[in-house]
Amino acid sequence: MIVDEGTNPFEVGCATELFGLPRPELGLTRPLYEVSLCGPTPGIRMNHGFFTLADVPGLDTADGADTLVVPGRPDNVVPRGPAVLDTIRRAHARGARVVSLCTGTFALAEAGLLDGRRAATHWLWTDSFRRLHPRVLLEPDVLFVDEGDILTAAGSAAALDLGLHIWREDHGAEIAGAVSRRLVFAAHRDGGQRQFVERPMPHVPDESLAPLLEWAQERLGEPLTVTDLAERAAVSPATLHRRFRAQLGTTPLAWLTAERVTLARRLMERGEERLEVVAARSGLGTAANLRTRLRRETGLSPSAYRRRFGPGVGEAITS
C-alpha cells in the first residue's frame, strides 16, 4: 500500500483492517494476506498533518506485491510525484492487481492506467476528475468498479465494500461473510449501488427495512417475490421500491437475487455438489438459472467455482 504526502488515514486504516491484521474469526493458522506500506520518503505526513508515519519502506517494496493499494488524498488537483506514478505503472505492467480507494483513482488516472476504462471515485470530485481525465469512463454514482486487474472504490467507506468484494473474489462468500461480521459491516453491497443514498428523517411508523430484510434472508429458499416482500412490509410494491432505493440504493428484486446468489455460493463452498439442490435451497429455482446468475456474479461456472472455493481448497473457518 502506497502512502504519500497528505494521504487520508481513513483509507489506510480500512485497508489495514481488511488485509493487514490477523483474522481470528476464520480460525486460520496463517494469514491470507501479507501487507506492507511503502512511500517515496521514510517520513510521511498524513492528511492535514494530523500525524506522521515514520520508517516507511521505500517504493521498491511494491515491486514484489501481487496487489498494489493506492489510498486517496484531498489535494487531487496536485499531481503525484513521478516516483509514485512510476511505481503504479510498474506494478500494472508486471500484472499486479491495482486497487484505488476513494480519490486514489486520480493517481491511477495520472499514471495512464484508466484511459478508456471504467472507474469510480468520490462523488464530490466528479467534476474535477472529468476535467482532468476526460478519457476515463467515470461511473459517478456507484460504490466501486471491478475491471479485473484494476479496481476503484468511491467515497471512503466504499473502501470497505471493495475490500469485502476482493475477499469474496479471492476466498469465496463464506470467508468474506465471516470477515464482514467481524467488521460489523454489511456483508454484500454490490458495486453498482449508489454512492450517496438519501436518508430522510423516518416517519411513524418506523420505515426501516431491517426487519423485512432479516425475515426475507431466513426464507430465501421459498418462492419469495417483490409482492411478497411488499405484503410483509404492509406497503405497495411501488412504496417498497422507493424505500429500497432510498435506504439501500438498489431495487427489491436486485437485492433478493444478490442474497440468493450469495447463499448459493456458500452452499457450494460447504460441499453441496448437486446443482438442483443448491438452486432450490437458495431460491434460484433451476440449475440453469443458477449457472447464469453465478457466471454473471463471479465469471465462473459452478464446477469452476467449486474447484476454486470448495471444501479442501483452504483451511475451513470455525463455526
Image (cartoon, rainbow, N blue to C red):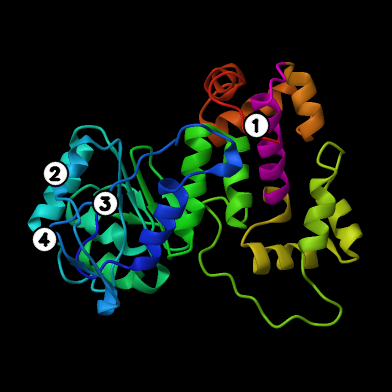
> Which mark is on residue 60?
2
Give the residue type at disc 4: Gly
Q: Are marks 4 and 2 in contact (CB under 8 Å)?
A: no
Q: Nearer the viewer, residue 55 or 183?
A: 55
The residue located at (85%, 53%) in the rendering is 215
Callout 2: helix, strand or loop?
helix
Chief secondary structure of the magenta span? helix
The residue located at (23%, 58%) in the rendering is 107
The residue identified by callout 3 is 37
Give the spatial CA distance, label 1 vs label 4.
43 Å
The picture places residue 236, in percent across and down from the top left corner, at 86, 65
Q: Nearer the viewer, residue 84 or 242?
A: 84
Going from N to C along the chain, the mark reached first, 4 or 3, is: 3
The residue located at (54%, 18%) in the rendering is 304
Give the spatial CA distance, label 1 vs label 3.
33 Å
Q: Are marks 1 and 4 in contact (CB under 8 Å)?
A: no
Going from N to C along the chain, the mark reached first, 2 or 3, is: 3
The residue identified by callout 4 is 81
Q: Are marks 2 and 3 in contact (CB under 8 Å)?
A: no
Going from N to C along the chain, the mark reached first, 1 or 2, is: 2
Seen in the image, is 148 located left or right of residue 116?
A: right
The residue identified by callout 1 is 265
The picture places residue 194, in percent across and down from the top left corner, at 54, 62
Give the spatial CA distance, label 1 vs label 2.
38 Å
Q: Are marks 1 and 3 in contact (CB under 8 Å)?
A: no
Callout 1: helix, strand or loop?
helix
Q: Nearer the viewer, mark 1 or mark 3?
A: 3
Give the spatial CA distance, label 4 vs label 2.
15 Å
Q: Nearer the viewer, mark 4 or mark 2?
A: 2
Seen in the image, is 23 located left or right of residue 132?
A: right
- Residue 149, picture quadrant: top left
Magenta segment includes 131: no
